[in-house]
Amino acid sequence: MRLRCSDGPGSSGTQEEAGALQLIGRRDRKWVRRQAGPPVGEMASRGKSETSKLKQNLEEQMDRLMQQLKDLDVCREDLEPEEYEETKQETLEQLSEFNESLKKIMTGNMTLVDELSGMQLAIQAAISQAFQTPEVIQMFAKKQPGQLRTRLAEMERDVIVGKLPRDVYTQQKIEVLTALKKLEEKLTPEEEAFLLTNVSAALSQFEKVSRGLGTGDKVLALAYSGVEITKKM
């Protein structure tokens, strides 16, 4: 189900649109809870094909949540401020539940820890609102440094020709460079300087809780930090 915006000011349907997102949210929460169901021993005994299928299902779930955020931003002007904030908060809560489910699924399965550590970091960035661009979060979650570099090049082009506002460019560039850094991609001295100059409060918090964390059990500590960060913002 996709959220469709109205064609212009005064169009009806904003309540139905918000309801559509809430319906997606209820469906996705049930899916997340089902994935956390099997015992640790059973999860650890999954064959390679089942692990691959589980990873695909998790990526599809992540994509649905990111699509919710994208649709919500596209339709922001068609929703009342209270509706927008309520629906966005509900989506962030779904991400928190998804993060908790990931922790349970990954427990005792080092293959999944290695495969899904990037996804957990990306979800943490979204929950803390250090990252606000769904496409960048998706690339981060799927460990796609090449696509992130392509996105950065497109942004550099768009800001020069006036297609991308400077403030949006700055926020998205921060996100892309931070994702690349967390994926252990080498940044140029100019890119490092850009991050230092434009660091935000949310990004500083994200850096603090994620510094030195990667694959393995350490990454699971990120699962609980997002709610606390959001409360302090």
Image (tube, rainbow, N blue to C red):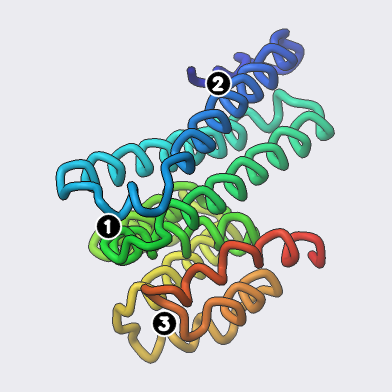
Q: Work out whether 48 lies above or below 160.
A: above
Q: Earlier in the sequence, mark 1 or mark 3?
A: 1
Q: Nearer the viewer, mark 3 or mark 2?
A: 2
* Residue occupying the point 60% across, 73% down: 206
The residue carrying pointer 2 sits among few (fewer than 14), some (14 to 19) or many (20 or more) residues within 10 Å by Cα, namely many
* Residue occupying the point 67% across, 44% down: 93
Q: Visible in this render: residue 122?
A: yes
Q: Work out whether 41 lies above or below 208.
A: above
**Residue 54 position within the rendered picture, expressed as x and y whole percent measured from the top left:** 30, 42
Say which amino acid is labelled 3: Glu
The residue carrying pointer 3 sits among few (fewer than 14), some (14 to 19) or many (20 or more) residues within 10 Å by Cα, namely some
Q: Earlier in the sequence, mark 3 or mark 2?
A: 2
Residue carrying label 2: 3
Q: Are marks 3 and 2 in contact (CB under 8 Å)?
A: no
Q: CA distance from mark 3 to mark 2?
A: 36 Å
Say which amino acid is labelled 2: Leu
Q: Nearer the viewer, mark 1 or mark 3?
A: 1
Q: Nearer the viewer, residue 154 or 204?
A: 204
Residue 191: which numbered mark, if any? 3
| SS category of the residue bearing label 3 | helix
The residue carrying pointer 1 sits among few (fewer than 14), some (14 to 19) or many (20 or more) residues within 10 Å by Cα, namely some
Q: CA distance from mark 2 to mark 1?
A: 26 Å
Q: Are marks 1 and 3 in contact (CB under 8 Å)?
A: no
Residue carrying label 1: 147
Q: Nearer the viewer, residue 163 or 30?
A: 30
Say which amino acid is labelled 1: Gln
* Residue occupying the point 33% across, 37% down: 57
Q: Work out whether 2 lies above or below 202.
A: above
